[in-house]
Amino acid sequence: MRLVAGGRLFSWPVPGSKSITNRAFILAALAEGESVLSGVLESDDTRYMRLGLCSMGLQITDGPTSDHVLIRGGLSQLTCPPEPVFVGNSGTTVRFLSAMAALVPGLTTLQGDEHMAKRPIADLVDGLRQLGVNVECASGCPPLSIQGGRVPGALVRMRGDKSSQYFTALLLMAGLAGHSIRIEIEGNLVSRPYVNMTIKMLQDFGAQIESEENAFVVHPVRNYKAIAYEIEPDASAASYPFALAAVGGHDITVKHLGPGSLQGDYTFVDVLERMGAVVHRQADNTRVVGVGTLRGIDVDMHHISDTMMSLAAIAPLAKGPTTIRNVANIRIKETDRLLATVTELRRLGQEVQMGDDWLRIDPRPIIPATVQCYSDHRMAMSFAVLGTVVDGITIADPACVSKTYPTFWNHMEQFASAGVRHAGE
């Protein structure tokens, strides 16, 4: 759909963070007592996490509103699942549950869909084995089986350039191993803000962690503490309305998301500001205003790579080229996101160059086309933003947004039906 001319003033209801929701599920599962989570995201990824935890013996119930969940947790509540746990294509679910299963006596098997069967997990498998955990994983991708109940090792060393989620997975469970565990980083750690988020949440639930330049030391605690925990809006999801405001000349606010966010992807607004958008940051909300033609930029997105496609999709409407660097890790996500983005931009008539970890977009007149999503939710949402500004763009698989943002199209329709009002009025 293409919006009519004129900016719109709109408060965009971004749902809860997927990254925080699935971390909070694990922490509440390991905490003794009842935790109350609010702002919980309902999506495919969080549903697979919830079902997986229930299959391991946890009691999880809905609270007074749809985004409240009550979890009665603790190691004493966890049991070996009688059947393989199906994780769909949820990377956080398979990685976090794999590490948590090391604490649960018995054999836990995790398997996913045909896309998950192509997603590497060998680095995490090797990390668990370094800690003395018996893990079977024939292909280096799911399915995998973990013989849990004992984590005798105290030192693990993993490459940092693949996925920060491998480190998060080990950090989440390490405090309950019964002894201190040192987790060392080989090379640079990609998406480090996500690990910082994990550490802050662990500390909120009572864990004790020391951070060094290239290592983390997790000290043993008797248990994590059950708490009431509020989940903030998803900063990665917020990149879509923020990008729409910047490129479409709109005035869009996201409430309850500000500079104090746990999520590194919040700094995507800094990228939009460099391009020429106006950003208003307050403690409890952020407002982006598009005030004219954006300018192309050269940007390192190593630590906010989930928002790479949000930038790439609007780059064809910027003045001058846009170069995105240091994003090799996106090639092992739901799809090879670097190649997928380049392929679809070229389909739309753009001149695009790429390397192993970068791409450069030279804007050209946009050719109407159907954008293929490769079953990747971020492809659909990123290019939908471009489709609101340019005629003739169709999204091939709109339903794939259910992975992390099932209400995305509803929110797009609400925005489209909002009254026309120029930004700044």
Image (cartoon, grey):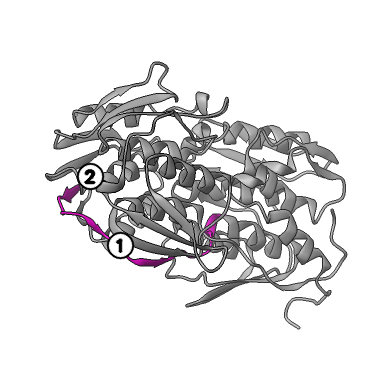
Can residue 206 be spotted in the picture?
yes
**Left/right of residue 21 with respect to residue 239 in the rendered view:** left
Residue placed most toward the observer, 208 or 420: 208
Residue placed most toward the observer, 289 or 274: 289
**Left/right of residue 304 with respect to residue 13 in the rendered view:** left
For badge 2, the amino acid type reads Ala
Residue with the mark numbered 2: 174
Residue 394 in percent (x, y) is at 82, 43
Q: Residue 240: name its quadrant.
A: bottom right
Q: Is residue 381 above or below residue 151?
A: below
For badge 1, the amino acid type reads Ala
Residue with the mark numbered 1: 226
**Left/right of residue 148 with respect to residue 397 in the rendered view:** left
Q: Residue sitting at 80 percent across and 56 percent down?
A: 389
The segment highlighted magenta reads: 215-236
Q: Residue sitting at 57 percent across and 25 percent down?
A: 114
